[in-house]
Image (cartoon, rainbow, N blue to C red):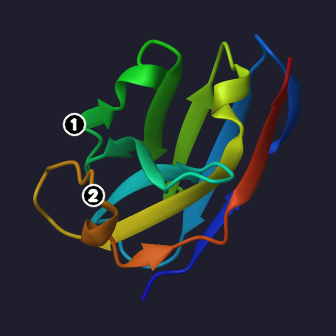
Amino acid sequence: QVQLVESGGGLVQAGGSLRLSCAASGRTFYAMGWFRQAPGKEREFVAGISWNGGRTSYIDSVKGRFTISRDNAKNTVYLQMNSLNADDTAVYYCAAKAIRLGIVLMSAAGYDSWGQGTQVTVSS
């Protein structure tokens, strides 16, 4: 329904930072989130944001290190990742759901559009 294009992944040393971007086509009213999947593990929710940016949610392991934000004028969502560690190594996926409620969606099943994914590798 909505096309999502992620960028910003790469190789970074432990303690370093990366900023992921997700550009979305279509309307502004999308709850959006970031998920990640490490080898041998299930895809997990990382961070989410309501369509207007008023609400954000994070899993405990990234609180204080990651920041999700959005620029609705550019229809783009960002994930600023600081103090990266090896456990953050994964393929990161952007997800979107057209919804006008100002809530954060934390379940993968709640989203209906997904990006291709961008690899984040943290070396120790």
Write the residue at 86% across / 17% down. 124
Q: Which mark is residue 107?
A: 2
- 55 above or below 118? above
- Picture quarter containing residue 121? top right
Left or right, 61 with respect to 116, comes to left
Q: Residue furthest left?
A: 101
- Picture quarter containing residue 89? top right
Q: Amino acid at mark 1?
A: Gly
Find the distance from the CA under tag 1 to the CA under tag 2. Answer: 19 Å
Q: Amino acid at mark 2?
A: Ser
State the SS at label 2. loop
Write the residue at 27% across / 50% down. 106
- 3 above or below 21? below
Residue 103 pos. (x, y %)? 15, 49
Residue 60 pos. (x, y %)? 36, 22
Left or right, 75 with respect to 56, comes to right
Residue 15 pos. (x, y %)? 76, 10
Q: Which residue is mark 1?
A: 54
Quick check: can you spot residue 8? no
Residue 76 pos. (x, y %)? 53, 54
